[in-house]
Amino acid sequence: MKKITKITAVILAIVMTVFAFASCGGSGKEEESSTEGASGSSSGKVWVIASDNAFAPFEFLDSDSGKYIGIDMDIMAAIAEDQGFQYKINNIGFDAAMSAVQSNQADGVIAGATITDERKKSYDFSDGYFDAGQAIVVAADSDIKSIEDLNGKTVAAKASTAGATYAQSVADKYGFKVTILEDSPTMYQGVMQGQYAACFEDEPVARYSIVSQKLSLKVIGDTINPAQYGFAVKKGQNTDLLNMFNAGLADIKANGKYDEILAKYGYNTTSDSESSTVA
Ligand code: GLN
């Protein structure tokens, strides 16, 4: 009797261990990347980096591999390799990624995040790594030609983004309503289906998505608030990580890796500006 109980306990322990290991496996949404450079990371620390989940060409799901790819993903990998640190990326969406840094659930965020004075109050940004402003995106067959034509209409913008901040800041002036959505694909669908007259999106992302996904959308008007994208950490925290990002960014700019990454996604770089060959 005693023996049977012991055997049962052993079997139970084995089963529980197997389950515990199984549940550690990838959820499909999380991408684990570990890179150990020549200098190695003796601390064994794995930095947690949060990112957007549908923001091509910076981070987007590659349906063939089931992995997140894009300029931000490649830049992070190249910098980690150069600086010899380990990290794990959680592609949880922009709003969630920015919040994750503030609530210490992530050490840093790389998500095509625009460096703004407002954000500098709660985040420390790396050096800029890409120039981008926002733009108005409308249905391909829309008559809307400028922001003035949005009078009396409803537009979409993505939660916590620079596009949303801008749209809300001029909504009264131009007489439109703003609906906040969680992600870029939902905005694009809503505009194509006529639910929203327009959406505010980062211009390179809108142009890349329109071409690569053959979306019935077009970009109108001038670029809004051009600024740089930066990697960010919570203000006053993870300074080591921020310093490694900056050092690695300088290295990959100097050794050609940065240009190679941008070229892979259709951008030809000149000394200090990017020009798209995509759209
Ligand atoms: N660049 C924009 C911002 O920082 C949008 C970023 C995003 O949607 N991933 O607000």
Image (cartoon, helix red, strand yellow):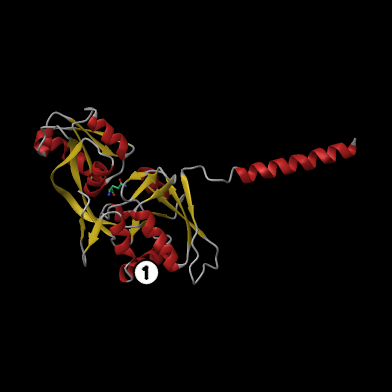
| Image quadrant where one finds the N terminus | top right
Query: Mark 1: is the Cβ under 8 angstroms from ligand 1?
Result: no
Query: Which residue is tagged 1?
Result: 247
Task: Where is residue 259? Give x, y as percent.
Answer: 29, 63
Q: Nearer the viewer, residue 123 or 68?
A: 68
What number of labels is visible?
1
Does residue 164 lie above or below 189 as drawn? below
Task: Where is residue 228? Give x, y as percent.
Answer: 25, 57
Q: Amino acid at mark 1?
A: Ala
Q: Residue at x 39, y 45 (%)?
A: 62
Q: Residue furthest front?
A: 64
SS class, disc 1 = helix
Q: Nearer the viewer, residue 249 or 271?
A: 271
Kindly tell me whether residue 100 is visible in this rendering: yes
Kindly tell me whether residue 234 is visible in this rendering: no
Q: Residue furthest right?
A: 1
Q: Nearer the viewer, residue 212 or 30?
A: 212
Task: Where is residue 179? Give x, y as percent.
Answer: 26, 33
Left or right: residue 221 versus residue 95 is left
Q: Residues within 10 Å of mark 1 (few under 14, many from 20)?
A: some
Residue 271 position by quadrant? bottom left
Task: Where is residue 84? Give x, y as percent.
Answer: 47, 67
Left or right: residue 232 versus residue 28 is left
Q: Residue at x 18, y 31 (%)?
A: 197
Left or right: residue 44 versus residue 221 is right
